[in-house]
Image (tube, helix red, strand yellow):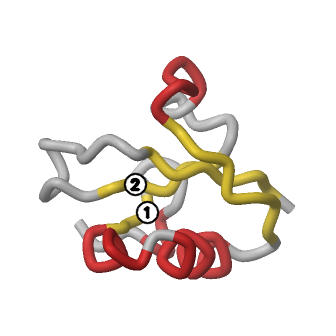
Amino acid sequence: MNTYYLNINQQDNSGYNYEVHKELCRYCFPYRSNFIKLGSFVYESNAILKAKNSFPYMASKIDGCKHCCHSINND
């Protein structure tokens, strides 16, 4: 089980998406002030579902990090 976070800043290098990251991702860890904790999940798909349900106004732009959440990344 991993803990997941949502970056609340749009990423200009990935289609202006909001990205879901695992807790120990090198692109998440140093920048925690920009992240909201989603919780702990067995599957990445559950983390992105939680993010989309929690932030419906951003749902179409929520994606997984290509470095730590391969199964939910759409780049």
Name the residue rendered at 49%, 23% in the picture.
31
Name the residue rendered at 81%, 60% in the picture.
40
Image mark for residue 64: 1
Q: Give left or right: position of 2 versus 57.
A: right
**Crowd rating for badge 1 (residues with CA inside 10 Å; few <14, some 14–19, many 20+):** many
Q: Are marks 1 and 2 in contact (CB under 8 Å)?
A: yes
Residue 48 location in percent, x, y? 54, 73
**From mark 1 to mark 2, how far is it between C-alphas?**
5 Å
Amino acid at the residue labelled 1? Gly
Residue 4 location in percent, x, y? 67, 54
Amino acid at the residue labelled 2? Glu
Q: Give left or right: position of 75 versus 13.
A: right
**Viewer-nearest residue: 62 or 42:** 62
Image mark for residue 32: none
Which badge, 1 or 2, is on the more N-terminal residue? 2
* SS label for mark 1: strand
Q: Is residue 26 above or below residue 68?
A: above
